Image (cartoon, rainbow, N blue to C red):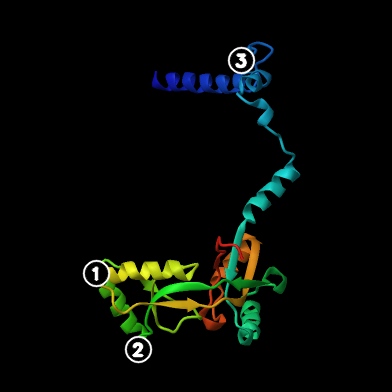
Amino acid sequence: MLRLLLAVVLLANLLFFAWTRGALAPLLPLPASERDPARLQQQLRPESVTVLPPAAVSDALRAAQARECLEAGPVQAADERAMDAALQRAGIPPEAVARVAVVQPAQWAVYAGPFTDPATRTRREQALRQQQFEVAPLDDRRAPQPGLTFGLHADLAAAETALAALQQRGLRDARVLELAAQNEVWLRAAAVEPVLQARLEAADALPAGLRFGACRKTTR
């Protein structure tokens, strides 16, 4: 009895599947609401639907995969040959990476340092955090190293105002430090394919400890 019931259920499923695909249309036609034209009419915005040919779909998929932008820098003139050699070892074609001239604008940092070594800077940073100060290492070639920053500002007046507020909270070893404007060279790979992206992110032995990362949102 159980086998018969199972066979009936299986046969009913097969018949329903065939009916929904239109195979039984001469005997059991689909209701009008289930036909493709009717379904199209039921869409809220049918004019927004575009059917793409296979070639266009492939192009769209490739475009969606090629949206990553990676960059590394700044690259010093003395390190450019070493950088080219490192990229070649990683199997990255030269035409995939462009050299981008960047004007780094002047900034003013609320700065503490330099300290005798990175370990001393780390201890001072931890102590300041315990005092509820927002502070971070300032790894900028324009600043004496190793140092700390309590914030970067676009103009001197804003930096001095920020420093005064910190001094009112008891900070005594900070000052305003000008980071002069300078020209830089960055390596940028725009619209990176997934395979190339993996190679760039895995590239090691780059000069000056540089690594490829996501392009910054700032305008250069």
Question: Callout 3 environment at 10 Å: few (<14), some (14 to 19), or many (20+)?
Answer: few
Tags 3 and 2 touching, CB below 8 Å? no
For residue 144, say whether it is visible: yes
Q: Position of residue 212 (x, y in %)?
A: 56, 70
Q: Does 22 appear above or below 81? A: above
- Which residue position is annotated with label 1? 131
Tags 2 and 1 touching, CB below 8 Å? no
Task: Tell me what residue is drawn at x 47 percent, y 20 percent.
Answer: 9
> From mark 3 to mark 2, how far is it between C-alphas?
79 Å
Task: Tell me what residue is drawn at x 32 percent, y 78 percent.
Answer: 122
Work out whether residue 203 or residue 160 is closer to the camera in this orientation and state it: 160
Disc on the earlier residue, 3 or 2: 3
Q: Is residue 89 left or right of residue 210?
A: right
- Which residue position is annotated with label 3? 33
**Quick one: quadrant of the N terminus?**
top left
Q: Is residue 205 left or right of residue 117?
A: right
Q: Does 3 appear above or below 196? A: above
- Which residue position is annotated with label 2? 116
